[in-house]
Amino acid sequence: MTVSATLAANEAVAARRAAGQEVLALGFGEAGIPVHPLLSQHLAQAAGRIAYGPVAGTEEAREAAAGYWTRRGNPTDAGQVLLGPGSKPLLFALQHAVGGEVVLPQPAWVSYAAQSQLLGREPIRVPVPAGEGGVPDAALMVAAVREARAAGRDPRLVVVTLPDNPTGRLASEASVRALCEAARELDLIIVADEIYRDLVFKPGAFPSPGQWAPERTVTTTALSKNYALGGWRIGAARFPDSELGQRLQESVRGIASELWSSAPLPMQHAAAYAWSDPAELVDRVAMARRLHGSVATAVAEVFAAVGCDVRVPQGGFYVWPEFEPLRAALAERWGVRTSADLARVLLDEFGIVVIAGDAFGDDPAALTIRVAVTGIYGESDSERLAALLSNDPLEMPWIAETLDALRDKLKALVA
């Protein structure tokens, strides 16, 4: 098992900067905004809480998480909630507890497949519907699962991401409903990773699988994306209010007791405050949506202007350009034939750090990359905060200059 591609990209940025080399960091999926002072205060208030806590989490934090989901249309009791040190270990524990093999959308976030492989299981990848992301095409999933079972394999769960990493797209309600119907037909547990839910750019109904398959959907979230608290490591899982959900939750609780004992109590205290949706933090998330949406849309336009196929992102802070229309030019000038070739040329020749599409399970021959736009927000907390507070982040001089530089580098790449 190698280091995660996204974390490796972050380390590559640090190494190049330490060597005095120019770098445009568009690889690591970090939210890129400063911590809200009130969150820091709540963390500091609980710094003295150094004992182990309950495995599932404190009542205060679980109640807050339950309220968070209830206000978003999924009525939840605190007893359905289990906390962990980030959503990533919760997702791993879920795969372990369910057993069998996992069905993943293609492409999908790098760690889903890696976690499956750590458990000795190869994931079953199913393409997403055209123009969408994060949810396997239901009809293709039915065929893939039936074929896998006929061959003696044992698929038991499907993981979806709403909105999606790496594509930045939000699956349609029709696709999610079809997915839920197929999961029920195939008796698959659905794991809905909704960590970017609060960062959907446009208001409207959110297609959560918990609405249409409540008896078999486990939903996960965390504070690392909407509040940019990745390093604090705190996440939550919501289990179904069903016999299946109770069995699964108890299994995950047992795994948690052996892997992390309990989520850190200071982080749970801060999370309880955040998940209660206080007005000052709701405003902060609204500003984050504006920043991410403005810059991600502008970056997509830059890639489209040089000839890439790219869908406008709908949430989070990612762009997924496809360089297929430029394949001949890239092959002739740079010898590019795979997404890994493309990412390497962007780094070696232009100092642009991105993640190759094959890291997300895409066909290696497909010329896709994932671009994380948060590296454009600024070099310091003061710049990033100014971008966050601006009514028009694209007017920030450093953002405008970085977009111009990206545009020039891409023009030189495809010229």
Image (cartoon, rainbow, N blue to C red):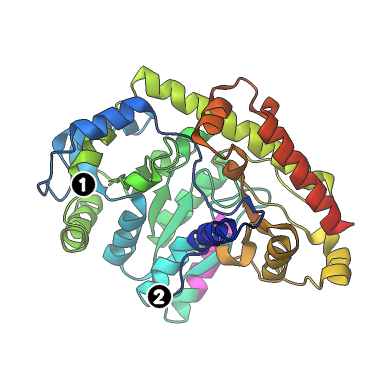
Left or right: 219 as drawn, with respect to 24: left
Q: Please report the residue visible at 68 percent of the width from the left and 48 percent of the height from the top.
A: 131
Q: Please report the residue visible at 51 percent of the width from the left and 74 percent of the height from the top.
A: 147
Name the N-terminal-most of marks 2 and 1: 2
The correct choice, above or below, for 410 with respect to 93 in the image is above
Residue 215 or residue 136, whichever sits in front: 136
Percent across and percent down for residue 172 are: 58, 41
Q: Which residue is mark 2?
A: 121
Question: Between tags 2 and 1, which lies in front?
Answer: 1
Residue type, label 2: Arg
Residue 245 or residue 406, whichever sits in front: 406
Q: Please report the residue visible at 37 percent of the width from the left and 18 percent of the height from the top.
A: 279
- Residue 374 falls in which quadrant of the image? top right
- Residue 297 falls in which quadrant of the image? top right
Which labelled disc corresponds to residue 264?
A: 1
Residue positioned most to the left: 51
> Which span of residues is magenta-colored?
136-147
Left or right: 159 as drawn, with respect to 232: right
